[in-house]
Amino acid sequence: MEAMRQAVERARAAFKSGRCRSLEFRIQQLKALERMVHEREKEILGAIEADLHKCGHNAYSHEILGVLGELALAMAKLPSWAAPQAVKRNLLTLRDEAYICAEPLGVVLIIGAWNYPFVLVMQPLIGAIAAGNAVVVKPSEISEHTAQLIADLLPQYIDPELYPVVTGGVPETTELLTQRFDHILYTGNSVVGKIVMAAAAKHLTPVTLELGGKSPCYIDKDCDLAVACRRITWGKYMNCGQTCIAPDYILCEPSIQDKVVENIKRTLQEFYGEDVKKSPDYERIINKRHFRRVLALLEGQKIAHGGEADEASCFIAPTILTNVSPEAKVMEEEIFGPVLPIVTVKSVDEAIEFINRREKPLALYVFSNNKKLIKRVISETSSGGVTANDVIMHFFLATLPFGGVGNSGMGAYHGQHSFETFSHRRSCLIKDLKMDGANKLRYPPSSQKKVDWAKFFLLKRFNKGRVGLIVLALLGVVAAVVIKMVYY
Ligand code: NAD
């Protein structure tokens, strides 16, 4: 425990030394991370395989590509992200310099989850380094091989004092959370999210909580079901259903339920062959606890496909449940496994109502040929993110902020959004000491005349582009003259 306190203290001292302030230093660290990923690719893929039974191709696409993409983006864009942003001025500040300056927060704690054990630690780490922070990294102990590898590799490539790795489980994380941080990004379930937020509140530390929940998927009957079901099958069963933004359940009208099942069954065969257990593309449940939890969700349900399981290897076959009651246990908690319930609804109105009666999800999916219907579903519901006519894909577009809302989380990251999450947007206004006459307006004694002028200066809006600017400048000159006449 003492080691943990020391690691945080060393990170703070290293941050205070100022060496991560320069953009050159940050880019150099990001380059080193990129070199690490290239040089140690085999070990990284091996650790992910050991944790999640994931083949090299899939581990590369799910975890390494995203990290390399985020690194390339951050290195290319950091100078523009970090550049001061000039802001519009009003009549009172026309002669001044006004801008927003992104400054590092200090020491950031990143707590990762096990389901994508590499990318969920590395992507926020990249953003936090780019923003100039020191970072304490805490990978999930449940994906133990990847956690150990991250702890071994990071100090070999990036500054070990600025970016220490702490390993361990609940006792270690609990202890770590007693330390003071300047920001915490936590990925995991909502129950622990509350623990993290409560611990952070003791130090008034802001948090980004990347949580989960039940992400609904509405399929309209006016839709290419073969394509829709192929995309849904891919997103639902990848990583054995253990994806935070996997479609958790399907909502559709009773008339298309059987066709949905048929299309998903056909796709499962295309993807994983006759014997899914032998497919190199099909992963396993992370451990026996989660295996039993997921299996228990099948009790009393009508299994339209799948349901086979093997505890020794934590295998659960891709499973579809039909005519599921909204009150069923499988509809109460996030499934986080390869089980896809279908709940029938009479119409899109009922689907919207169904979604809105529950906690705000992390992701929402809608399939339809009708753009109006898609836009309606988006405008009448709320969720962390939405993809229409596909699943998962909004995660991969770095210009979109990735995060939840309400019970599915707070704050967001990815690309420039990560940089902003780990930066303080400092307001800077630089004036000179001349023309103090104008300030008489705000200095006592007060008068109605002063209030009227203040109203003019602060409330006047000119939205006519170039002409407006010229008028504004002229008014500024007139105002300065008037002030001089009135107050001197
Ligand atoms: P987990 O068990 O790996 O826990 C996450 C982290 O919390 C770990 O580092 C762990 O050490 C720590 N932790 C666990 N219990 C703790 C406690 N009592 N006090 C302090 N720290 C504690 O992961 P999990 O929670 O099983 O992850 C699955 C959940 O995460 C799902 O709900 C999933 O949807 C969500 N998730 C969200 C995202 C996202 O980006 N929004 C990504 C992945 C997973």
Image (cartoon, rainbow, N blue to C red):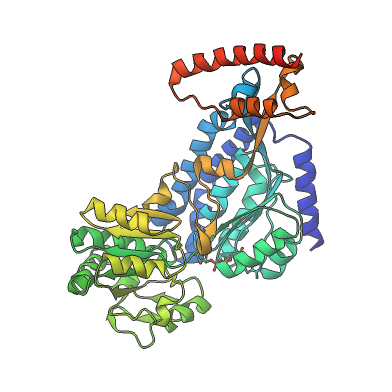
Q: Is residue 3 above or below residue 351?
A: above
Residue 122 relative to residue 227: left or right: right
Which of 210 and 353 lies nearest the eye of the viewer? 353
Is 473 placed left or right of 228 in the picture? right
How many numbered dots are placed on residues in this image? 0
* Residue at 23% from the left image edge and 57% from the top image edge: 368
Q: Is residue 369 above or below residue 89?
A: below
Q: Is residue 222 left or right of residue 37?
A: left
Picture coordinates of residue 53, whole percent (x, y): 45, 66
Image-based side of 472 in relation to 482, left or right:
left
In which quadrant of this rendering is ligand 1 seen? Answer: bottom right
Residue sticking out furthest to the bottom: 300
Q: Is 305 placed above or below 243 here?
A: below
Residue 325, horizontal then vertical, whole percent: 34, 81
Q: Which image quadrant: the N terminus?
A: bottom right
Residue placed furthest toward the front: 448
Question: Does residue 262 appear in this view?
Answer: no
Residue at x 30%, y 62% (from the top left corner):
232
Picture coordinates of residue 35 (x, y %)? 55, 40
Residue closer to the observer: 66 or 153: 66
Determine whether 109 is above or below 483 in the image: below
Visible in this render: residue 468?
yes
Indicate the position of residue 195 as horizontal and vertical percent values. 66, 67
Answer with the quarter of the image where residue 27 lies.
top right
Residue sitting nearer the eye, 356 or 440? 440
